[in-house]
Image (spheres, rainbow, N blue to C red):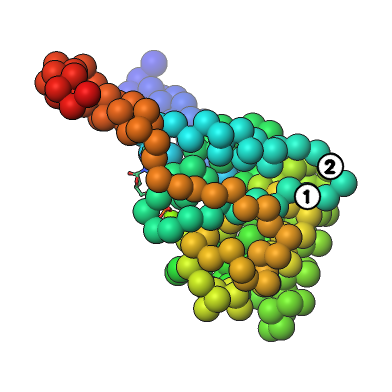
């Protein structure tokens, strides 16, 4: 074999490799297009979990927690409870705790509105999206609320939804509460409030949140200070 024949043979091999490479490029592009054009598989819907932060040192409040557990009960009407008490007594902490305790019961989702900062129109839109809907075009607040109620119902069927309306202060919150409660007609609702006499809360059963009992206070100190030996000494001295 002379040099020129050898070159021809090499060229031939190279060009076959090019063709193979070109062929594989085409098929990769083709596959990529098929992936892009393929209809999206139905997205798996997951129940939303809008949760308050649990207080890591949460202590006591057994009575209130027992009453709050009825939020998970199935009945003719959906449960509506309010934790009522003055500022700083632990209403939000209790709401966070019970929501976390019951989260597996609420297979239709857990919703949250922080009343002091909530924009009701945006909140209803947010909730609609969580249940695969869109209510942006609906300008009337009550109609928007009704549509959200329907969307939740259509999406979850007989599954259960819990909503927490946290941080109600006084009658100035009434305009925010009414449409939210309306949207939540089919949901269990827990409100935390300093005022109990608001029309929107008329059907809510009040669970009073009062100051900590002595035992709860001691337990809380233990939890915060863990095994600090000084605590025992101080408590003995105090007694
Ligand atoms: N059961 C509890 N165990 C441990 N700490 C608690 C408990 N309850 C309340 N606290 C502490 O007290 C703080 C104030 O409580 P929380 O915010 O729940 O009060 P609130 O009643 O919701 O007040 P507001 O009316 O201002 O919203 C919490 O951040 C937490 O640190
Ligand atoms: Mg609070």
* Mark 1, residue position: 78
Q: Where is residue 21 in the image (x, y as percent from the top left)?
A: 50, 35
Choose between 166 and 149: the one closer to the eye: 166
Extreme-right residue of the structure: 76
Choose between 27 and 44: the one closer to the eye: 44
Residue at (69, 83) in percent of width and height: 139
Q: In this view, does 194 lie above or below 221?
A: below
Dividing the image into 4 quarters, which one contains the N terminus?
top left
> Which element type, helix, strand or loop, lies under badge 1?
loop
- Which labelled disc corresponds to residue 223? none
Q: Is residue 235 above or below residue 20?
A: above
Q: Position of residue 35 (x, y in %)?
A: 64, 44
Q: Quadrant of residue 64?
A: top right
> Is residue 35 at all visible to an observer of this figure?
no
Residue at (14, 18) in percent of width and height: 233
Left or right: residue 232 versus residue 154 is: left
* Mark 2, residue position: 75
Dividing the image into 4 quarters, which one contains the C terminus?
top left
Extreme-front residue of the structure: 239
Please tell me how crowded label 1 is: few (under 14), some (14-19), or many (20+) other residues with Cα within 10 Å: some
> Is residue 210 at all visible to an observer of this figure?
yes
């Amino acid at each position: 074999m002379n040099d020129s024949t050898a070159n021809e043979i090499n060229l031939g091999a190279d060009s076959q490799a090019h063709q193979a490479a070109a062929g594989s490029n085409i098929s990769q592009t083709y596959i990529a297009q098929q992936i892009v054009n393929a209809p999206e598989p139905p997205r798996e819907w997951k129940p939303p979990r809008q949760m308050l932060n649990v207080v890591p040192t949460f202590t006591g409040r057994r009575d209130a927690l027992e009453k709050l557990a009825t939020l998970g009960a199935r009945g003719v009407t959906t449960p509506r409870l309010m934790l009522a008490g003055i500022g700083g007594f632990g209403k939000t902490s209790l709401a966070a705790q019970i929501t976390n305790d019951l989260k597996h019961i609420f297979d239709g989702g857990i919703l949250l509105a922080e009343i002091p900062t909530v924009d009701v129109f945006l909140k209803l839109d947010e909730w609609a999206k969580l249940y695969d809907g869109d209510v942006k075009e609906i300008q009337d607040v009550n109609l928007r609320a009704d549509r959200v109620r329907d969307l939740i119902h259509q999406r979850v069927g007989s599954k259960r939804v819990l909503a927490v309306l946290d941080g109600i202060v006084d009658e100035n919150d009434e305009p925010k509460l009414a449409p939210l409660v309306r949207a939540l007609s089919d949901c269990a609702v827990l409100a935390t409030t300093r005022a109990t006499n608001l029309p929107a809360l008329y059907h809510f059963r009040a669970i009073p949140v009062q100051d900590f009992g002595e035992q709860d206070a001691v337990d809380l100190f233990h939890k915060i200070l863990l095994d600090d030996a000084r605590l025992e000494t101080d408590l003995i001295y105090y007694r």
